[in-house]
Image (cartoon, rainbow, N blue to C red):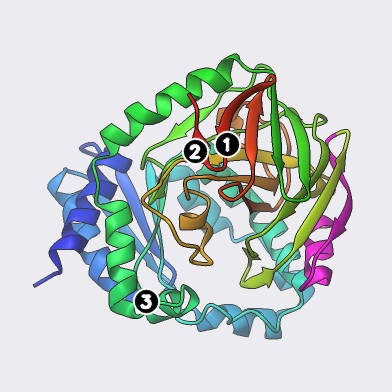
Amino acid sequence: MADPRIRRLASILVGHSLNVKRGETVLISASSELAKPLVLELFREVLKRGGHPLTSISFEETLNIFYTTASRTQIMHLPRTRLYEARNVDCVINIRAPVNKKGLSGIDPGLIGLRSKALKPISDVIVNTKRWVLCNFPTNALAQEADMSLEEYEDFLYRATNIDWKKVKSREMKLKRLLDRGSRIRIVGRDTDITIGITGRKAIPCYGERNMPDGEVFLSPLESSAEGYIYFEMPAIYQGREVTGIRLRFKKGRVVDARADKNEDFLYAMLNTDRGARYLGEVGIGVNYGIKRFSKDILFDEKIGGTVHLAVGKSYRSAGGRNRSAIHWDMIKDLRGNGAIYIDGRLIQKNGRFLI
């Protein structure tokens, strides 16, 4: 018998997150065979709602084989069958269930960037034109990365996902209204003072319809507006690489100086992926105070109440963004100790707590 928490999560993903309707085709994609318990419950839920489920289950080890064996031509190849699939499904559920979080640590980051560029037409179709949701399934790799036992991580995940998302929505709408009326966000904290233009950009409250867990309000800023500098206390993890102590300086919206305490070469490689990689695609404010500890997983960490995150690279069309890039890399700034957020000079958050 399936864990009732898995059934509850499957019901939320299919019913709340995607609101699957009769006759719709739903792609259930999992990064490894470890996600089988959730895949089966999702398959069942889609059928119960009259939809047509498709499954795509990967073997994680194939990525390492690919990067160590493929030619440049193969790395740059666009799989047109996958592009056709992306264009013809109605919804996508993407489940991350890693076997080894460090599986790509020995791979040249330049190759990873090239592959991301090659697959960009597929990701663009899904992100910009389809209903989609991203979710973790508890694995030992995720638990170890978060410094938890598997049982602790299961509790951590299900406490963050199996909640009343309609109540979350009502709390986020207040912040959205404030951001929608604003023209500038200023973020101040340790080694940080940065101002970002938001005039005319629509803030999007997130309450479980894209990411699970959720709990943020984000927008895509004006592309040439960021001015100042920022230090990210929390490690920034992308493509299996952990970069710590990141410091970025912006001028006219562009990263003009970048530093890191660890894996600085990888930071440079990602920022040089393409022209858009040095501009901001997102500014997000975390509002989920139920997630209190850092887990080395952006899906959870960017939602921590009292933090903000900036993403370099691709912006969201739904938020009015115009920046194009093959990457989208979120970096988290902790404001809970000594930080503040201002909108048009008005203090709206101090030391991680809202004043609105």
- Identify the residue shown where x is 77% and y is 37%: 194
- Horizontally, is 299 left or right of 222 in the view? left
Badges 1 and 3: C-beta atoms under 8 Å apart?
A: no
Badges 2 and 1: C-beta atoms under 8 Å apart?
A: yes
The image's mark for residue 263 is none
- Numbered range of the magenta stretch: 253-272
Whether 266 is among the magenta residues is yes
Whether 120 is among the magenta residues is no
Query: Mark 2 highlights which residue?
Result: 353
- Horizontally, is 339 left or right of 246 in the view? left
The image's mark for residue 139 is 3
How far is mark 1 from mark 3, CA to CA? 36 Å
Residue 6: where, in percent of width, then height? 21, 62
- Horizontally, is 122 left or right of 262 in the view? left
Could you tell which of marks 1 and 3 lies nearer the N-terminus? 3
The amino acid type of the residue labelled 2 equals: Arg
326 or 152: nearer the eye?
A: 152
The image's mark for residue 350 is 1
The amino acid type of the residue labelled 1 equals: Lys
- Is label 3 in a helix, a strand or a loop? loop
Badges 2 and 3: C-beta atoms under 8 Å apart?
A: no
- Is label 1 in a helix, a strand or a loop? strand
